[in-house]
Amino acid sequence: MTVMTRRRKAQADLRCAVVAPSSILAGRPNSNSPVTSRSYSSLGFRLSLESRRTYIPRNMAAIRSREAVLRCAVLIPVLLAAVCAQTASPAATSGPSQPLISLVGPPLSGKTTFADAISRTYGIPSISIEDLIRDNAAELKQLQPQGVPVAEMRYDPAMSRYLRERLKTADLSHGLTLDGYPTTVFQAEQLAKMFPDLKLKLVALRLQVSDDIIRQRAKTTGRQIDQPQLLEQRIKDYHREMDAIAFYFPNARIVDIDASLPEGQVWERIEAALDNAGLRPVAK
């Protein structure tokens, strides 16, 4: 091979070298190079990945030897492979492992029944909105509008304050089940604000029951709050407030459960949803 041939080969190698690491990691392509790029933002930053046809100008005064170019060519793919692996697998980063299970649904959809079953089967403690009402009945009676049963104070903004206080002393080492909370848009907003501090992963089980089935179930309860006039208002309140719960928790696992089925079949679907979320029953 002649001297001229070797020189031309060396220049061709240099022209096809990879751009310097600082240019890539700063998200800036080589200013003199026509490149294509893709952006990844799932890790909270933007990374510009250069295509293979990235050309470096012929003037290589900044690079003193072919060895320097080769070191860059080896180093950059390694760095990019590591970053892309993280980007493609966000689960690899550490995150909450215990669940916050929120059971939401219309009146008489079985929230308390299944919250109790979850606690027994998975060893996850629960807080129900009825607990919050009972524990704060004295204050709620002062806030209670005339003609509104205390049980219907579940819609009051004070519920979020009661829950926040309860969480300060709750044992969350095995997670937590919320029975009937949130009930309103305001409560959903407040839970979204509390959620980051809880260090739990949210799993929302939305119990779906038709309005007609709710009315049929209400005929057998004998409770004041299930009387037709109050029941109709509760149904309207639920649809108005909670049909859009996914808006407040866009990253949550929200599973719709057909709660109009017999109780055993509903429970099977809840177990399947919790299994998919990585939960396992406690050993008996």
Image (cartoon, rainbow, N blue to C red):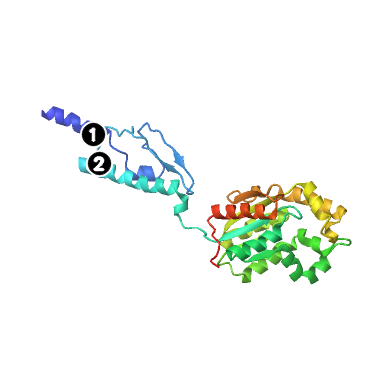
In the picture provided, is 274 more to the left or to the right than 188?
left
Assess disc 1: are there few (<14), some (14-19) or many (≥20) residues with their C-alpha within 10 Å of its C-alpha: few
Relative vertical location of residue 83 with respect to residue 192 in this rendering, above or below: above
- Rendering coords of residue 179 (x, y %): 68, 60
- Rendering coords of residue 34 (x, y %): 37, 31
Please identify the residue farthest to the right as the structure is shown: 147
Q: Residue at x 34, y 34 (%)?
A: 52
| Tag shown at residue 69 | 2
Where, quadrant-wise, is the C terminus in this rendering?
A: bottom right
Q: Amino acid at mark 2?
A: Val
Relative vertical location of residue 282 with respect to residue 262 in this rendering, above or below: below
Helix, strand or loop at label 2? It is: helix
| Residue 268 visible in the snapshot | yes
Assess disc 2: are there few (<14), some (14-19) or many (≥20) residues with their C-alpha within 10 Å of its C-alpha: some
- Rendering coords of residue 66 (x, y %): 21, 40
**Dot placed on the residue nearer the N-terminal end, 2 or 1:** 1
- Rendering coords of residue 21 (x, y %): 33, 44
| Tag shown at residue 73 | none
| Residue 65 visible in the snapshot | no
In the picture provided, is 29 more to the left or to the right than 145?
left
Where, quadrant-wise, is the N terminus in this rendering?
A: top left
Give the distance between the C-alpha atoms of the residues marked 2 and 1, in whole angstroms.
Answer: 9 Å
Contact, mark 2 vs mark 1 (Cβ under 8 Å): yes
Disc 1 target residue: 13
